Amino acid sequence: MRLLPEPSAQSLRLIFLLIFVMGVAPSPALTAGCPGRCMCDDQLVVQCVGQQLTDFPTDLPLATRQLIISNNRIGELPALQLNYLSDLVYLDCSNNSLTDITESTFGNLRKLAYLDLSFNILINIDDRTFGPLASLVMLRMTDNPTLSEIHPDAFAENLALQVLDISRNNLTALNITTLIALPALRSLGISGNPWRCDCDTEDLCLWVQIEGFKFQAADVMAECRGSTSPFLTKSLRTDCHQTLGYWDYLFFIAIGFVIFSTGTVVAWVMEEISCVREVWWS
Ligand SMILES: *[C@@H]1O[C@H](CO)[C@@H](O)[C@H](O)[C@H]1NC(C)=O
Ligand SMILES: *[C@@H]1O[C@H](CO)[C@@H](O)[C@H](O)[C@H]1NC(C)=O
Ligand SMILES: *[C@@H]1O[C@H](CO)[C@@H](O)[C@H](O)[C@H]1NC(C)=O
C-alpha cells in the first residue's frame, strides 16, 4: 500500500482557510431569504402551496432545487425570475391559472427532471416550449380543459422523458411521429381527451392498439370505438388508405370507353375527310 505524501504546512493552511470560509460564508439559499407566504427548508425545498398567490413568488433562493407553487392563481411564469433558478430539479405549478408558456419560460432549467402543469388553462403548446429541458424525466400536463393543440415536435428534444401524462385535456388529434421516437418513453397517459378518431389520428390509435399494453392508454381505444366514426370498427388502414372500390373500376372503364370511342370516331372522320379530298382533287 502506498502512503500519501505528507501535506505541506502551506497546503494545510489553505485547507483550513477553505473550511473556515465555507463554514462562515452563508449559502446562497440563506442570502436570498424566503419569499413571503412560502416555506423554505435547508434541503432547498420551497413550498408556497394554496396561498392564493396571483404572481410568481419573488426573491426565491437562487439554489432552490424543488419549488412547489400548486393550488394558487398564478397566471404567468416569468421567464426571467424562473430561469435564475438554474439548479431547479422539481417544479410543481399544478392548479394555477397559467394560460401561456413559451420557449423562453424554461430556457435555463437544464436540470429540471419533474414538471407539473396540470389543472391550468393552457391553450396550446409550441414546438420549442420544452426544448431546453434536457433532463426532463416526467411531465404531467393533465386537466387543462382549454388545451387543444400540441405541436408535433413539442417533445422532440426531451430525450430523457420517461413519463408523459396529457390526460383530460381538450385534444382531438396528436401527431405522434416524434413521440414514438423518444428513446426513454415508457408511460403515456392520453385518456379523457375528445380524440377525433379519424384519419388524422390514425397513427395515434394504431400505435395505442399495437403498443397500448405498455401505456396507461387502454381507455383511449374504448373512446375511439365509442365514437360515431366507423373508424376502428373496420380495419384502420383500409378506412384511411382506401383502395379502389367497385364504382372506381366502373368509372375507369367508362372513361376508357369514352376515350376509345372518341378516338375511333376521330379516326373515322379523318379518313372520311381524306376520302372526300381525294375525290375532290381527282
Ligand atoms: C385547487 O386549488 C384550490 C385553492 O387552493 C382548491 O380549493 C382546489 O381543491 C384545488 N383543486 C385541485 C384539483 O387540487
Ligand atoms: C375544445 O376544443 C373545441 C374545438 O376542438 C372548441 O370548440 C372548444 O371551445 C374547446 N373547449 C374549451 C373549454 O376550450
Ligand atoms: C407529423 O409530424 C411530423 C414531424 O413534424 C411531420 O413530418 C408529419 O408530416 C406530421 N404528420 C401529419 C399527419 O401531420
Image (spheres, rainbow, N blue to C red):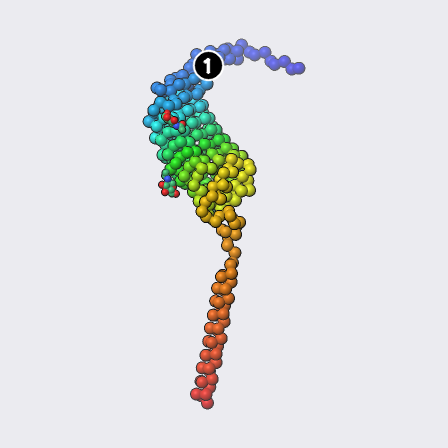
> In this picture, is 211 found above or below 236?
above
Residue in the picture at 41% in, 34% down: 143
Whether residue 162 can be seen here: yes
Which residue is found at the position 45% from the left and 82% from the top? 273
Disc 1 CB within 8 Å of nearest ligand 1 atom: no
Farthest bottom residue in view: 282
When the figure is inspected, residue 109 is found, relative to residue 272, above or below; the finding is above
As drawn, is 15 to the left or to the right of 108?
A: right
Q: Position of residue 144 (x, y in %)?
A: 40, 35
> Dot 1, how many residues are within 10 Å of its Cα: few (below 14), some (14-19), or many (20+)?
few
Residue furthest toward the right? Answer: 1
Which residue in the protein does label 1 denote? Answer: 22
Q: Quadrant of residue 120?
A: top left
Name which residue type carries label 1. Answer: Met
Relative depth, front residue between 114 and 173: 173
In the image shown, does 274 or 32 lie closer to the viewer?
A: 274
Which residue occupies 49% across, 61% down?
247
- The correct choice, above or below, for 19 with respect to 173 in the image is above
Quadrant housing residue 3: top right
Let me know if residue 176 appears in the view: no
Which residue is pictured at 48% across the width and 80% down the height? 271
Please state the horizontal and vertical placement of residue 150, each as a whole percent of the image.
43, 40
Residue 249 location in percent, x, y? Answer: 51, 62
146 or 81: nearer the viewer: 146
The picture places residue 112, in percent across and down from the top left corner, at 46, 28
Residue 116 higher or lower than 197, as above or below: above
